[in-house]
Amino acid sequence: MEDGENDGKTLVFVTVGTTSFDALVKAVVSENVKEELHKRGYTHLLIQMGRGIYSPPKVCDGADGSLAVDYFTFSSSIADYIRSASLVISHAGSGSIFETLKLGKPLIVVVNEDLMDNHQCELAEELEERKHLYCARPHTLHQTLTKMELESLVRYAPGDGTPVARIIDRFLGFPDD
Amino acid sequence: MCFKIVKDGLVSRCSFGLSIVSPTLHGLLVLLLFLVLILCDDLETCTPLCVIAFLFKFKLLGVRWSSIFFLYVENVARVKKLSLSGFMHYKLRTADQLFIQWPQLQNKYPRAHYAGSLM
């Protein structure tokens, strides 16, 4: 893959946004998930853990060919991390989802089952149906990784605010052109 | 002319009184009188402002205070059903236009406008 490879480094970026999503962090650093990512050619795993309590063990450039793991809590902008990644695993927040889709990166959305009013999974499932991303739960992440085919994902075309803007213009009395 | 004087008189007395009682309410009143358009998303904090704006559109104390155009844009994460704020504005018809970002909602809420995804 062309994009995402910097100095032979293939990065998987995991983000939980501003939430606390320990289940995802734990799932991502579990042995079978790391092994699957390694099998698919990823070399580095970077986790943005937000308000989570669980800190995964850091692993410097894997000696025996295992995945290098690093993490941080927050950053003012994750766009650069997304841009340098080959795969993004994200929580189901609409901001994180659309930021990744607009940058054209393969995305796996993991829905947090501990959340109360979980309307977020509606968005993730709808976008999965339209083949823009893969959707999973923390305990099914490994399964999704084994079965995914990133080439089959369809690039998301960003939305357009022009129809709404036109209605506002019309009300304010601006001519229609 | 007379109408304007009455309105201004009422406004200045209202304004003065409110600014002593609550600077926030005073600011809100001034804002609503000069406001032309409210464009709102699914945020609980917006709802009181929107409801007050809706009331202001009608005649209060015999005076038509303002004609605010209130546009509500439903959250892009709402695919199968409206949020609580959206549902309230839809049912009570407080919003002039209610936009949805997914076509599935159009069947359930025919009066809403589908203008495509904004994201």
Image: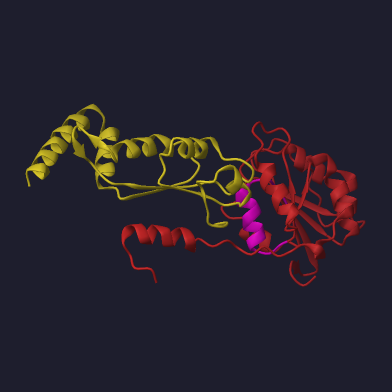
Measured from the top left, where is residue B34 in percent x and y?
Answer: 25, 47
Query: From this viewpoint, which residue is outermost toward the left?
Result: B2
Q: Is residue B70 left or right of residue A118?
A: left
| Among the 4 quarters of the image, the one containing residue B49 | top left
Q: Is residue B77 visible?
A: no
Residue A98 colored magenta?
yes
Q: Residue at x 79, y 41 (%)?
A: A138
> Quarter holding the C terminus of chain A?
bottom left
Residue A153 colored magenta?
no
- Give me the chain that's red: A
Q: Residue at x 73, y 42 (%)?
A: A111
Measured from the top left, where is residue A174 in percent x and y?
Answer: 33, 65
Up/down of A10 relative to A68, above or below: below
Q: Identify the colour scheme used.
A: by chain
> Quarter holding the N terminus of chain A?
bottom right
Measured from the top left, where is residue B87 in percent x and y?
Answer: 52, 37
- Give me the chain that's yellow: B
Q: Is residue B16 visible?
A: yes
Measured from the top left, where is residue A113 in percent x and y?
Answer: 73, 35
The front one of A76 and B92 is B92
**What range is drawn magenta here?**
A88-105
Q: Is residue A143 left or right of residue A122?
A: right
The front one of A86 and B87 is B87
